Amino acid sequence: KAGVTQTPRYLIKTRGQQVTLSCSPISGHRSVSWYQQTPGQGLQFLFEYFSETQRNKGNFPGRFSGRQFSNSRSEMNVSTLELGDSALYLCASSLYSGGQETQYFGPGTRLLVL
Amino acid sequence: GDSVTQMEGPVTLSEEACLTINCTYTATGYPSLFWYVQYPGEGLQLLLKATKADDKGSNKGFEATYRKETTSFHLEKGSVQVSDSAVYFCALSVNTGNQFYFGTGTSLTVIP
C-alpha cells in the first residue's frame, strides 16, 4: 500500500505570496493532519480534517487554512507569506479520527520564504 | 494542558552502547503514547506505541513502557547501531481527538 505523499517536496516563495501544499493520504485513511516543523518551535499542530470537515485546529493565524476533498486528499494554503513561515510542513493520515489512531507521516514539503 | 517533555539532546553514543531517552507527559484523560523517528531529510516514522497503562511497545530492538504512576514513556535500546542515528520524538494523543502533542525531539548520533 502506498504511503502518504506530499507535493511539492520543495518550494521557494517570496514574502507576501501565497502557497498551496498537497497531501494524499494512505488509501482508505479518512483523517489528515498537518504540522509545521521548525528548528525553534519543533512540531506544531496546524489542523486536522476528517471526512471533509475540520475537526481540530492548532494555534495558528487565519493565514493558514486547509481543506479536504471527498477522496480524502487534503490541501493546505498559506496566504501573505512571512519569513517565519519557512518550515517543513508535514502531513499525516490515519484511518479514523481518534486518540488511539496511529498517524502515518509523509516526507514533508520544505518551504523557504525569501 | 496536554504536553510532552522530552530529554534534551543531542546524544552521542558509541556503537553497542545502551540508550535511554526520557519522556514524561501531562494529559487529561487517558492518552495513547508514541515514539516516532525521523531520519535526515525524511518525514516521521512510527517506531512504537502503547495505548494503555503498563503496555510495552517494542520494535527494532527499541522498547518503551507506559508508566501511569510516573507519567513516563522512556525509550530504551540495549545495543545501538550506527543506523539508529536519527531524531526521536515522543508524542501523545488524547482520546478526545486526533491531535498529537510532540516533544521537542532528541537527536541521537551513534559513532562506530
Image: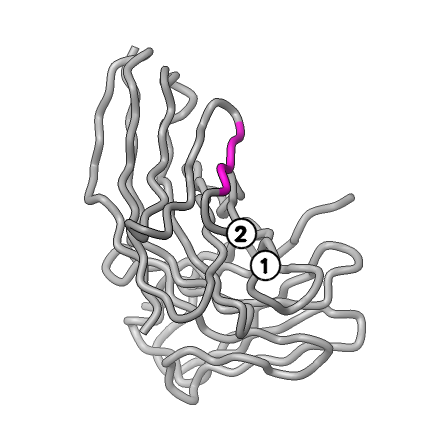
Residue B23: mark in rendering: none
Residue at image position (38%, 24%) is B77
Q: Which residue is mark 2?
A: B51
Which corner quadrant of the image does residue A101 belong to?
Answer: bottom right
- Circles 1 and 2 in contact, beta carbons < 8 Å: yes
Q: Where is the C terminus of chain B found, in terms of image quarters?
A: top left
Q: Which residue is mark 1?
A: A100
Instruction: Please tell me whether mark 1 sits on a helix, a strand or a loop.
Output: loop
Q: Residue furthest front?
A: B69
Q: Position of residue A34 (x, y in %)?
A: 52, 67
Q: Where is the N terminus of chain B found, in terms of image quarters?
A: bottom left
Looking at the rendered structure, the kind of residue marked 1 is: Gln
Looking at the rendered structure, the kind of residue marked 2 is: Thr
Q: Does residue B89 appear to the left or right of B94 in the view shown?
A: left
- Nearest to the observer: residue A30 or residue A77: A30
Circle 2 crowding by C-alpha within 10 Å: few under 14, some 14–19, many from 20: many
Q: Is residue A24 magenta?
A: no
Residue at image position (65%, 53%) is A5
Query: For the magenta stretch, what is the residue range?
Result: B55-59
Instruction: Please tell me whether mark 2 sits on a helix, a strand or a loop.
Output: loop
